[in-house]
Amino acid sequence: MKGLLVVVLSCWSCVTAEANERSRQLALQAFDAAYNLDHREAIAFLDQAVQADPNDADAHRAVAVIAWLRIGFLRGSITVDDYLGSVSKPNINMLPPPADEARRFHTHIARALELAEAELQRRPNDPDAHFRVGAIIGTQASYGATVEGKVLASFRAARRAYNEHEAVLALDPSRKDAGLIVGTYRYVVSALSLPIRWMAYVAGFGGDKSRGLQMIEEAAAYPSLTQTDAKFALLLLYNREKQFDAAMRVAVELQKRYPKNRQLWYEAGTTLIRAGRYQQADDMLSEGIRKRDGDRRERMFGEDALWHYKRGLARARLGRVDLARTDLQIPLAREAREWVRGRAHAELGQIANTTGDREQARREYRLAIELAIRGNDPIGQAAAESLLGTVR
């Protein structure tokens, strides 16, 4: 399972009045659709936006971001779970992305950067021009890390994104939205393993967790088109910092704003599990599963497995063994990522152990270890190995 990579977000909703008004309105509609998981509608809106103004850098970058988001969705890797942990390697082996989405990303991000660079040359002291270039390069860096696994190379590329948004703050200190990328990189560098952190320092980054988090909080409170991005970032970072009440406040706020995004109920439920509030987690996840069952739109890869693994975990902690076992069997029978299957086996092993079936517990733990290794889940692997060692 991936750890925290470069930037989990990219300020992708920065649309300005520089664009053709028709293009701008279509892009805003696309953002709202994407946040509600209406990906196909978002793509259609952005195709129209590019047609309305082929020279709108923001529209081209938004097309690229939707392609990046689609790749994560098709891989099943857009949850907070995917960004907990740390990075210990400069590169991570990853499966190639869907060719059509990758092509769409690269075509539009290149055009966006070409247009934005030309604008910056014309207006070198304009905060908006610096913001746009930084956001585009930040998107490229994030794609390289999260899709291609090029962690170190992405840090080097991201240095300019960081610099451009620091330039925005220097030109206009009131632009708290520029603090989103700057703050995120500050936080991320502080969370890296020591060898990768030194590589980041060599690339020119500084790490300051508390200041980074503060800057993201300020961006989330600042009225702008990047405000929602900042709130999604806080949902992740508050979970990493074990500030679960704060994370829940953000999750509930986002649920109200984007009621069609069923994944927000998943994220709220998993936050409650991390907080040890298992009954509330069961209730939240059950509500989300009902929303999922009534939602005929496309599902994320392995989505059913994730929902039921998490609810099974909550129910196991509540001692509801039969209900937990039923949920935990679903990741083993439906499409699922390896780490999800591995952790489901580990939970089933704990149930077997508590009910006295030691041999079954050992089998489950061994399967959990095997799947964790295959799924690049060192946290799950260590937990399963520890549990196996307790079986007597």
Image (cartoon, helix red, strand yellow):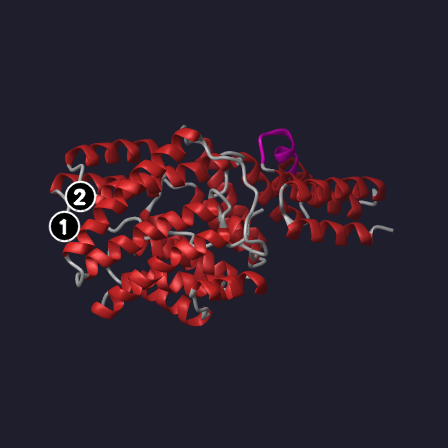
Q: Is residue 285 visible?
A: yes
Where residue 69 appears, as percent x and y from the top left, is 40, 41
Instruction: Give the quarter of the image for residue 226.
Output: bottom left
Q: Is residue 188 above or below residue 116?
A: below
Q: Between residues 342 and 255, which one lies in front from this camera angle?
A: 342
Label placed on residue 17: 1
Mark 2 = which residue? 24
Label 1 neighbour load within 10 Å: few <14, some 14-19, many 20+ = few
Q: Is residue 173 visible?
A: no
Find out whether the residues at labels 2 and 1 contact each other: C-beta distance under 8 Å. Answer: yes
117 inside magenta stretch: no
Q: Between residues 378 and 391, which one lies in front from this camera angle?
A: 378
* View extreme (right): residue: 392
Q: Between residues 347 and 138, which one lies in front from this camera angle?
A: 138
Return the disc, 2 or 1, that comes first in the chain's sequence: 1
Q: Residue at x 46, y 52 (%)?
A: 153
Magenta range is 328-336
Label placed on residue 317: none
Where residue 3 appears, as percent x and y from the top left, is 55, 52
Q: Is residue 21 above or below residue 242?
A: above
Inspect the image, locate mark 1, and give the three-letter code of the amino acid beneath it. Ala
Left or right? Give the position of 149 relative to 142: right
* View extreme (left): residue: 21
Q: Between residues 298 and 193, which one lies in front from this camera angle?
A: 193
Q: Is residue 225 above or below residue 66?
A: below
Label 2 neighbour load within 10 Å: few <14, some 14-19, many 20+ = many
Characterize the magenta stretch by its predominant secondary structure.
helix
Inspect the image, locate mark 2, and give the three-letter code of the amino acid beneath it. Arg
Q: Residue at x 57, y 43 (%)?
A: 93
